[in-house]
Image: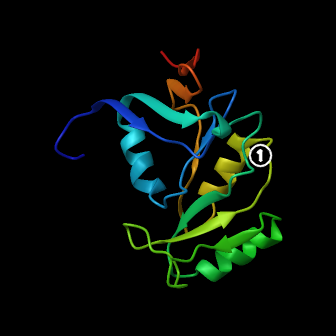
C-alpha cells in the first residue's frame, strides 16, 4: 500500500450490509488492514450474496481488533455495556491473532440501531485498534441473485 499514492478500486466481500450502505466486515479477522486499504481507495465495491443484505446490521457478530495488553479489561467494559463480547479463538482453541498480532473480540449485538454512535464509542475505547463497522465507505454493492446480480448504488458517494 505504501508504494502507491492511492487505490482506484477495491473489491471486497462483506459480512452484512444494510439499505443505508453500512456494513460489517471482519469475519475473516483482518478488518484493520482492510479498513486501511478502504480509506485509501477512490471507489469500493462489495460483492455479497442476498443473505448478507439486511434491514439493520448487527445479527452478524461485530469484530473489534484490540491489543493483547489489557484486553480482559476491554472485554469487561464491553460486557458492562451489554455488547456480549466473546474472545475469538483459532482452530486450536487459542486466542485468534490478527496479521498485526492483535486479538479479536466479537460483539454479539443482534441489532445495531445507531452504527455511527457505536463506532465512535468503540474507537474511543482505550485498547481498541479498530472495529468492523464500515460506514459511509462503499460506492456499490453487487448482490448475487438467481438470474443476474443486482447492483445497488450508494447515492451519497460519487
- Residue 69 x/y as whole percent: 51, 82
- In the rendered structure, the answer to whether residue 156 lies left or right of residue 99 reads right
**Which sits in the foreground, 40 or 53?**
53
- Residue 91 x/y as whole percent: 50, 78
Above or below, 73 relative to 36: below
Please tell me which residue is depicted at 22% across the width and 35% down the height of the picture: 5
Above or below, 64 relative to 71: above
Please tell me which residue is depicted at 59% across the width and 73% down the height of the picture: 88
Please tell me which residue is depicted at 37% across the width and 68% down the height of the picture: 100
> Helix, strand, or loop for circle 1?
loop
Please tell me which residue is depicted at 45% across the width and 47% down the height of the picture: 35
Above or below, 94 relative to 55: below
**Residue that extends furthest to the front in the rendered view of this protein:** 147
Labels in figure, total: 1
- Residue 75 x/y as whole percent: 68, 75
Colour mode? rainbow
**Which sits in the foreground, 69 or 155?**
155
Corner quadrant of residue 122: bottom right
- Residue 60 x/y as whole percent: 69, 52
- In the rendered structure, the answer to whether residue 50 lies left or right of residue 4 reads right
Q: Is the residue marked by circle 1 packed among few (<14), some (14-19), or many (20+) residues within 10 Å?
A: some
Residue on which the image places disc 1:
112
Above or below, 2 relative to 53: below
Amino acid at each position: 500500500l505504501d508504494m502507491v499514492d492511492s487505490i482506484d478500486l477495491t473489491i471486497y466481500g462483506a459480512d452484512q450490509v444494510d439499505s443505508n450502505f453500512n456494513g460489517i466486515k471482519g469475519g475473516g479477522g483482518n478488518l484493520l488492514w482492510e479498513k486501511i486499504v478502504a480509506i485509501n481507495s477512490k471507489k469500493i465495491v462489495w460483492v455479497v450474496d442476498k443473505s448478507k443484505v439486511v434491514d439493520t446490521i448487527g445479527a452478524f457478530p461485530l469484530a473489534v481488533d484490540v491489543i493483547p495488553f489489557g484486553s480482559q479489561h476491554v472485554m469487561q467494559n464491553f460486557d458492562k455495556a451489554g455488547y456480549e463480547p466473546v474472545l475469538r479463538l483459532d482452530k486450536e482453541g487459542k486466542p485468534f491473532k490478527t496479521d498485526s498480532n492483535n486479538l479479536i473480540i466479537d460483539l454479539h449485538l443482534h441489532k445495531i440501531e445507531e452504527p455511527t454512535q457505536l463506532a465512535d464509542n468503540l474507537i474511543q475505547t482505550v485498547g481498541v485498534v479498530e472495529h468492523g463497522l464500515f460506514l459511509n465507505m462503499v460506492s456499490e454493492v453487487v448482490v448475487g441473485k438467481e438470474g443476474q446480480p443486482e447492483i445497488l448504488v450508494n447515492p451519497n458517494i460519487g
